[in-house]
Image: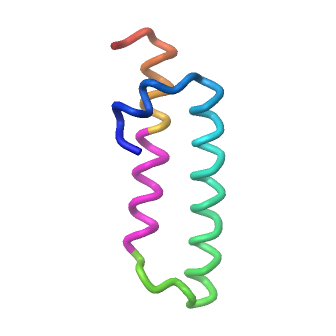
Amino acid sequence: MNTKELRALSNTDLAKQLEDAHQELFNLRFRLSTKQLVNHRELVAVKRKIATINTVMREKELGIR
């Protein structure tokens, strides 16, 4: 989901997306620690997704855009 699509979501939908991303990050870290994670770039992608969601939520809070 790109930034434009995230900006179109409501605050509750953004919170749900953030919760899902945190759960996905937890699962990836668990798989990493048990040496089952093949693609380590997935961690970076999920962290970036979390940062983007947090940025969009903050923009909405401040009334930017």
Farthest residue in the bottom direction?
Answer: 35
> Of 35 and 17, which appears nearest the observer?
17
> Of 46 and 33, which appears nearest the observer?
46
- Which residue is found at the position 37% from the left and 12% from the top? 64
Give the quadrant of the C terminus. top left
**Residue 53 vertical placement versus 61 (above, below):** below
> Of 37 and 2, which appears nearest the observer?
2
Give the quadrant of the N terminus. top left
**Image coords of residue 27 (percent x, y):** 64, 69
Q: Is residue 39 left or right of residue 30?
A: left
- Which stretch is magenta? 41-52
**Residue 65 vertical placement versus 21 (above, below):** above
Colour scheme employed for the rendering of this structure: rainbow
- Which residue is found at the position 52% from the left and 83% from the top? 37
Q: Could you tell me what secondary structure mostly forms the magenta stretch?
A: helix
Residue 15 lies in quadrant? top right
- Which residue is found at the position 46% from the left and 67% from the top? 43
**Residue 42 vertical placement versus 52 (above, below):** below
**Image coords of residue 42 (percent x, y):** 43, 69
**Image coords of residue 61 (percent x, y):** 51, 15
- Which residue is found at the position 57% from the left and 33% from the top? 14
